[in-house]
Amino acid sequence: MIDVLAANNIPILWADRPTGSLATDRMALTNPDTTWADCGRDAAGRRLSSEYAVYNITVHGDSSTSIVMVAASWSMNPQPGKTSPQCATSGVRESQLERSIKERAERTAPTT
């Protein structure tokens, strides 16, 4: 899980190895994808991208079978004096990360 997050430049706020849980702090997205969340549309009708994300990840299992759950909260930069607008997740990014973490967790060591 940690290797996949590092490869995706996702910094870890805290991790609890016994429970397999990990969380990130609110982080700015450098290259957001409009398929990750629905943040509405601008005046010209273009989809708006999320600007921030918070991830909560839990992994259970071992090298033969694992269960990976990724939850993401997406938001945009708030207007002065207003709360940060929340975006509705599409589940796309969560599925990408779940798949990557699961594949890495279940990868067997090469035989020599």
Image (cartoon, helix red, strand yellow):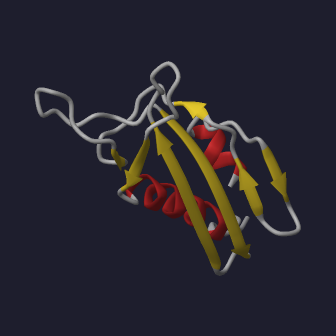
Q: Picture coordinates of residue 17 (x, y %)?
A: 86, 61
Residue depicted at x 61% and y 60%: 104
Q: In this view, does 22 lie to the left or right of 92?
A: right
Residue 68 higher or lower than 61, as above or below: above
* For residue 51, side relative to residue 20 (left or right): left
In this rendering, does residue 75 appear at all? yes
Residue that lies at the very extreme toward the bottom in this rendered image: 65
* 94 relative to 45 in the view: left or right: right
Give the residue at x 48% y 27%.
Answer: 78
Viewer-proximal residue among 46 and 3:
46
Judged from this view, the residue extending furthest toward the front is 81
Q: Is residue 110 visible?
A: no
Numbered-mark total:
0
The one nearer the camera, 50 or 12, is 50
Question: Which residue in the rendered view is the most extreme toward the right?
Answer: 18
Q: In this view, does 69 lie to the left or right of 46?
A: right
Please report the residue visible at 30 percent of the width from the left and 47 percent of the height from the top: 35
Residue 39 in which image quadrant: top left
Q: Residue furthest left?
A: 44
Residue 107 occupies quadrant = bottom right
Q: Which residue does the image show at 73% across and 64% down from the upper left?
A: 112
Q: Position of residue 109 (x, y in %)?
A: 71, 65
Quadrant of the snapshot with the N terminus: bottom right
The image shows residue 25 at horizontal and vertical percentages of 69, 39
Above/below status of 89 relative to 68: above
Is 8 or 56 nearer to us in this picture?
56
Q: Position of residue 106 (x, y in %)?
A: 63, 70
Which is more toward the observer, 101 or 69? 69
Q: In this view, does 106 lie above or below 32?
A: below
Q: Quick check: 101 above or below 42?
A: below
